[in-house]
Each structure stands twice: as C-alpha cells, then as structure tokens.
Amino acid sequence: MICKPFALLSSRLPDHTNMPHLFRIITLGCKVNQYESAYLKEAMLSAGLRQAEIGDKADVVIINTCIVTQTAARQSRQAIRKAIRENRGSTVAAVGCYAQAFPDDLFNLQGLGVIAGNTKKGQLPEIILDSANSGHKTFLLEDFKPGMPFEFLQIRRFLDRTRAYLKIQDGCQSFCSYCIVPFSRGPYRSLAPEKVLSMLESLSDRGCCEVVLTGIHLGKYGIDLEGQTNLNSLLRAIGSEGFPARIRLSSLEFNEIDSGLMEMMASESWLCRHFHIPLQSGDNGILRKMKRDYTGQQFARTVQAAHETVPLAAIGVDIISGFPGEDQSAH
C-alpha cells in the first residue's frame, strides 16, 4: 500500500550528543541517482563532514535507493538494513525512489532517521544534518504536482572524476506496463538551457573531459519549457559555446533519434558517437503488452539509419527477457 503523502513530520529518537563528523553515501541505480549523490556529497563536505573510509563507522549514512527492477528494490532494502546494523546510533537516511514509492515499508524500520522521496532534494542536506544533530526522525514525502519545476541541484565537480554526469531532465509519463518509474519520478521537468550551459562551463573549467547529459526520459528534454526548446536545440547551443569537454548522451528512445541528431553526431567532434536505445523486445506482440508504441521493424530501421549516417557509432540496447507471455518464438 502506498502511504498518503504528508508534510515534514518529526518524532524523537535517542539524542545525539556529538555533532556528526563522518558520512557515507551508498548509491544504487541510474546516472540520475549518481548525479544527485554527487550533490549530496558536495553538500556534506561543505558542511564540514568528512567522507568515511572503508571500515569506519559513519555518523551519517545516506542510501540513495532504486526500484527500477525487483532486484534493485531488494538491494535497496538490504543496503538500508545493513547501514542501520553497521552504524548503530548514527543517522541513517533512505532517500529517492524506494522511499517515494514504498514509504510504508520503511516507516516502522527501527534505526532509520530520515525517509525522503524525490521531491525537494535540495533541502535534503539540511534535513539530514538537522536530524543528525537533534535526534529527530524526519519524513519528507510529497506527491508530484502537474507543472512542478525542475529542481536544479548545482554541483562544482563530479566525485573527482574526469567524466561527469549532468542531470538535465527528470520525470517520465510513458507508463510502460512493466515500469514503476513514472510513479517514483513524476512528470516531465527540464533544466533551463542557460543553466545547462552554465554547468557545462563550470564542469569543463574544473577539468571534466566528458559530460554525460542524463535524465529519466532524456528525449523529452524541453517539453515543459517555453518556446521550441528540445534536445537538438540544446545541443546546437552547446556546440556554439566550444566547451573543451566532449558531450555524451545517455538513453534515448528510438523515435527521439531523428536525422538532425544523427547528422550532428556524424559531423561534430565534441559529440560522442554513441547511441543507447532501449529496445526491450523485438517481438511486436510483446511490445504491445509492454505498451511500447512501436514495432521491431521500426526500431530496426532507425538503427540502420544511425549506422549508415554515423558508421563508427557505438549502439547499445536494453532487452527484457522473460516478459509474461513471452514464448520461445517471441524470445
């Protein structure tokens, strides 16, 4: 059962007599989660905490959860329980998709100090640190609202790596029959182009050689913004800036890869020659059951066109095997 959303509430946990010093962040799931964890890490460091080393007991443990598959959900539950068990008396925070979709599973879990979903993530560092300092148990769980804006989580660097992820889009409204993501991530939201450009400049200046543009449904970038903003127009704006970092795109649906994008990828050296295209099934009957609005033949034509236009492009796909009703022939 999904709990009804409610505002920030508190109940008393055992007092923390010391200010927190060490933190640990455990991240499950997608590139969007990894970007959000980079934001949380930077906020913890800015607050004066240090990242715990292997074997250290952390004063604050944040589990950024995932539920995209049954396995991911189970791993999220295991990570939460392990964090509580290994860091008794510390503040353990379960945040992200699992908390958003299944808060009832977490409410009565002893030792869990913060439960927070996928809204108002910019407030999480303050909320987690307040819980650690005060000993209050805190819940931040709200419904998604139509027209809600993109929450810009600004970072200066990405986990000290030369490849960075940049979250520019959030939310999905496809409602494929197998997928819970629309319920855990809400409606389409996009980061304004000028903020994308500002972040790319900042990351490039700090030594990032490659930035992966990512989102929950990246191909819907701009659909909620005014004007004719879309992924292609954003890429043209990026190209005109001449950033030293190359740009890579995360997953795109096959019908979001048009000739303009293919030609840009073929001609622009700053745009990585790489497509990741979820197929899920090549069988048309299974695709209909999945509520995927295309056929295997349409998908194949797009892949062929991409190969012909960008011969050296790497092309990856996602496949779901064993979908209900899939017989040997469909497989």
Image: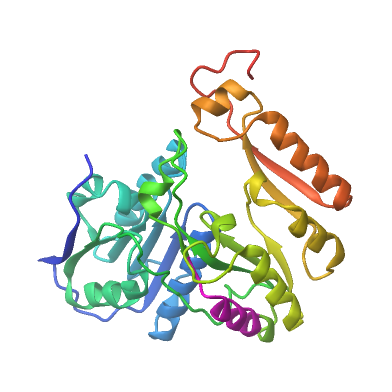
**Quick check: can you spot residue 11?**
yes
Residue 66 vs residue 254, the one in the foreground:
254
Q: Nearer the viewer, residue 148 or 162?
A: 148
User: Magenta part of the protein: which range?
Assistant: 190-203
* Image position, residue 299 (x, y; %): 70, 36
Q: Residue at x 54, y 66 (%)?
A: 167
Judging depth in this view, the residue of 204 and 198 nearest the camera is: 198
Question: Which residue is rendered at x = 56% and y = 23% of the image?
Answer: 286
Q: Is residue 130 magenta?
A: no
Residue at image location 59% in from the left, 27% down from the top: 321
Indicate yes or no whether the magenta region holds residue 191.
yes
Between 287 and 68, the residue placed more toward the observer is 287
Residue furthest to the top in view is 328
Which quarter of the figure is the N terminus placed in? top left
Q: Magenta residues: mostly which secondary structure?
A: helix
- Residue 309, given in percent of the width and then of the height, sits at 86, 51
- The x and y percentages for residue 253 are 62, 47
Q: Using residue 159 as the reference point, say whether residue 211 is left or right of it.
A: right
Instruction: Name the quadrant of the C terminus.
Output: top right
Chosen colour scheme:
rainbow
Task: Identify the residue shown where x is 30% and y is 55%.
Answer: 84
* Vertical order, 177 against 171 (above or below): above
What is the quadrant of residue 298 in the picture?
top right
Residue 143 shown left or right of residue 330 in the figure: left
Left or right of residue 115, residue 148 in this image: right
Residue 211 seen: no
